[in-house]
Amino acid sequence: MTSPTDPTDPLAHIRDLFDLDDDVVYLDGNSLGAPPKAVAERVQHVVREQWGRRLIRSWSEGWWEAPERVGDRVGRLIGAAPGQVVVADSTSVNLFKALMGAVRNTDRMEIVVDEGTFPTDGYIARSVSELTGLALRAAPPEELDLRDTTAVVLLNHVDYRTGRLLDMARLTEQVHAVGAKVVWDLCHSAGVLPIELDALGVDLAVGCTYKFLNGGPGSPAFIYVPKAGQPVFDQPLTGWTGHEAPFAMSPEYTPDPGVSRARVGTPDIISMLALDAALDVWDHVEMADVRAKGLRLTSHFMSLVDDLPDIEVITPRDEWRGHQVSLRHPEAKRIMAQLIERQVIGDLRPPDVLRFGFAPLYNTFADAERAAATLKTLL
Amino acid sequence: MTSPTDPTDPLAHIRDLFDLDDDVVYLDGNSLGAPPKAVAERVQHVVREQWGRRLIRSWSEGWWEAPERVGDRVGRLIGAAPGQVVVADSTSVNLFKALMGAVRNTDRMEIVVDEGTFPTDGYIARSVSELTGLALRAAPPEELDLRDTTAVVLLNHVDYRTGRLLDMARLTEQVHAVGAKVVWDLCHSAGVLPIELDALGVDLAVGCTYKFLNGGPGSPAFIYVPKAGQPVFDQPLTGWTGHEAPFAMSPEYTPDPGVSRARVGTPDIISMLALDAALDVWDHVEMADVRAKGLRLTSHFMSLVDDLPDIEVITPRDEWRGHQVSLRHPEAKRIMAQLIERQVIGDLRPPDVLRFGFAPLYNTFADAERAAATLKTLL
């Protein structure tokens, strides 16, 4: 049994970079990551110095390029070389850009979405279907039934309810085999495991930054558009900051030749630079270590709760899982409320799923043990 | 001649609520408002207390409803009763929602946009035209040439280059006379003068919060959807937070019955609550006073620069202007650079327009005088 000061845990010292109370077992980093200490100070600097002292001049002193610069930092964590990721807007808005960008100028006839998708992905896919006239079909990832009429497939890398991880390499290859494009939603996998978007030839990807990337509540999302796809990436949110010459104030829209064409309106700087500060944590860690510890933490927790009465572990036992453990219990709602009262914070997915997210940057084996022990007392 | 301590200026004490250096003449509040002092402290509270201590629980302790709550605060400044404004996304994204919402389910054939529009409005209108098949026509506001085939008219309340103010009452009536809808872009008028969206029966409006509302760089924008129009407001960015039951995680999208259907993704809380703090300033002022002082400040400045060599004032002299003064000069670029070196901060709209924004909350008559005197030395 390992302990929080386990000398074999190469990430044990990283928890000190987070502003977390010692008496809290925080297992909801899959919904809202904990604050890295650097964020509060950075945000003060942005408000008091950059905005307060430099005022409008800050736009030409680093603000304007922040979506691309911070995007490159996110890119490093998901296997994207520089110049292919921008941080902007919300995941839902980026999904709209990605799907519209994927299906414009196609003569193919359908959009496929994995049937267990996070709802917003399905809603946006439906909207794109209605706007473009392409059919929308939901299918299980094991049986996508792709055809030469399939235009694009939208897949959630990690299932938000069960924590199941899809095989990005195999599925990307499957989609490409029929000549379709794939859009990956990385909300529950960015910051969880090494991702190789460039190496796998992924067409488009989106994700949020407020879960395992700890960017803060509702921090801006990202979109990945690889170099090869940029010239044909035609998305309908043609805001001025995606223009090739935004300050020329030209009446005609000409998209930026690169990834900046995925930008829309004026970037939200305070939140963007809060995220920038939060990403500093990643300068000190290897994603392989994060992944290894995440698998150990979740395995350990599953082994501790496995025999508890009426508990069903719905997260896969093998490596095809993210860093969350989902448990089914008929009284999930009562149990989660009581856990939270006892400072063990997870969340609920109605009607009956308890979710526990393990963030290897700040969660410890002691967290897993206290959570399991508390759960046991409530059953 | 009035002075900064003018006893007749009911807003003289408001400048103390802003964190502005005394040696700076900041005349770019029409591009980025100055920081209210309350913002830095509030943002610290949000990061350290709400995020740091309460973690995920803060979502049910005020974060979730922030778009509507802060929206109502903005609404009070633009003549919108509660429940009709949400703060979310960027102006460009909100324009997309507004225009798509205005033209869906219409059998009319054209979108009209004022020909001097801020570029992003024109770009988004073009995109909506391409998506929907409606024609797009640019027209001068004096001669919109509206027809019974016009579906929607998009107008900028204050022209970003010249500062001209349009007659919202008259134009709204004109648009309604042909049975079309009007979308007002309030970016350069929110926080400038009393606006009466409800009373005028405006169909839709959008605007940013980082200019005269001082929300911070790229702070989230707003969209107004009046009660009567909400049931038919069908916008394609169907993100999960616009759902009538977002946490039910239903596979089908059913929009919220009210203004929340204009929400898309997870709201960006740090920036949202920075804006919330910035809006506190408005609790202490009457918009009529802001407007009166703005007209006096801009009149005063125009009178001081009127006879300067090669300067052409392109802002209207009458009351049909916002709170900016735009001057044309062949060497505008050099002059603005030199003004900024001398701590008189305005901005440039290429090729030859110098813009000076007067924010009555923090700008003084001394600011106008120093700006004019500095300009004079450079000519």
Image (cartoon, coloured by chain):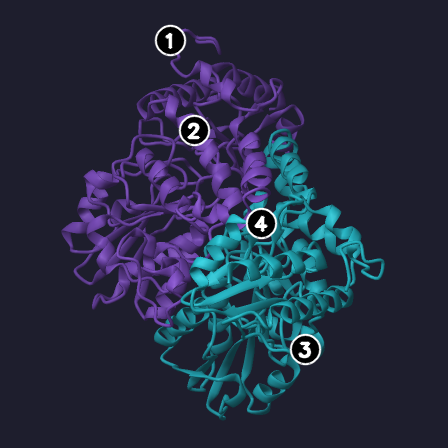
Chain colours: A purple, B cyan
SS at mark 3? loop
Amino acid type assigned to the residue bearing label 1 in the image: Thr
- Mark whose residue sits in front, 3 or 1: 3
Using the image, name the chain to which the residue with label 1 belongs: A
Q: Nearer the viewer, residue B3 or A180?
A: B3
The residue pinned by badge 2 equals A280
Amino acid type assigned to the residue bearing label 2 in the image: Asp
Q: Is residue A169 left or right of residue B119?
A: left
SS at mark 2? helix
Using the image, name the chain to which the residue with label 4 belongs: B
Q: Is residue B111 left or right of residue A245?
A: right
What's the distance in space between the residues labelled 1 and 4, CA to CA? 45 Å
Circle nearer the N terminus (4, 3): 4
SS at mark 4? loop
Using the image, name the chain to which the residue with label 3 belongs: B
Residue B216: give its label: 4
Q: Is residue A45 above or below residue B141?
A: above
Q: Quadrant of the C terminus of chain A?
A: top right
What's the distance in space between the residues labelled 2 and 3, CA to CA? 51 Å
Do callouts 4 and 3 mark residues in contact (Cβ within 8 Å)? no
The residue pinned by badge 1 equals A8
- Mark whose residue sits in front, 2 or 3: 3
